[in-house]
Amino acid sequence: MRRHVPTLVLIRSPEDAVLSHVVHTPALTPAVSLRGYVRFHEPLLPHRAGFVVGTFEEVVGDFGAVIERVNRRFGTTFRPFEHLPEHLARIDRKIDDDYRSRARTQEDLDRTVPLPSERRREMKDRLRAEYLATPAGLRRRAESAFETLRDDR
């Protein structure tokens, strides 16, 4: 922002972000990840006017519309992503190929590849109770930061 660079901040609900993060990095606990979520998001709040927010759902569902918001806000001319099946399939293939080439085991791949899968859903479901056992005040702070950023789009 100080350098006047058009900025898009991607946000995701605390529960979804924390569960995904802990699946990816199993050495972390939901409580540690949630504290990191709060440490990242709360300092953004006073600077909200200096960037565009895109929710995870918006970015994966219609990234072109998010890019159009960036262009309107900053007067830029970034070409919006065309959310077409062939473009999505190409991206998924590239992501899968990249992560597959680096994973040492199937377990590594299941944990790290940022694509939906039944295996990742199962891992998140097993962690959900541990997330819900994190301090309620910390969860409220994370939710408040998320809601403030999301609602101020």
Image (cartoon, rainbow, N blue to C red):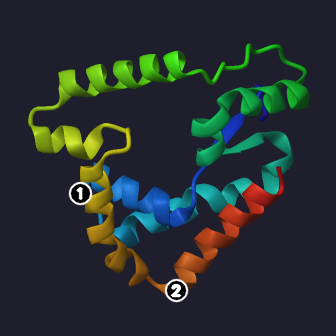
Q: Quadrant of residue 73?
A: top right
Rendered view: 120 above or below 125: above
Quarter of the image with the N terminus in it = top right
3 or 126: nearer the viewer: 126
119 or 55: nearer the viewer: 119
Where residue 140 appears, as percent x and y from the top left, is 61, 79
Kind of residue indicated by mark 1: Pro
Q: Does residue 4 appear anywhere in the picture?
A: no
How far apart are the alpha carbons under marks 1 and 2?
Answer: 22 Å
Q: Does residue 91 appear anywhere in the picture?
A: yes
The total of numbered circles placed on residues is 2
Residue annotated with mark 2: 136
Q: Secondary structure at mark 2?
A: helix
Residue in view at x 57 percent, y 54 percent: 12
Mark carried by residue 142: none
Nearer-N-terminus badge (1/2): 1
Q: Quadrant of residue 101?
A: top left
Q: Quadrant of residue 75?
A: top right
Residue in view at x 71 percent, y 53 percent: 44
Residue in view at x 38 percent, y 84 percent: 133
Mark carried by residue 26: 1
Q: Secondary structure at mark 1?
A: loop
Kind of residue indicated by mark 2: Ala
- In this picture, residue 74 sits left or right of residue 11: right
Where residue 139 appears, as percent x and y from the top left, is 54, 77
- In this picture, residue 104 sits left or right of residue 102: left
- In this picture, residue 83 sits left or right of residue 134: right
- In this picture, residue 103 sits left or right of residue 57: left
Rendered view: 152 above or below 81: below
118 or 153: nearer the viewer: 118
Where residue 107 appears, as percent x and y from the top left, is 13, 45
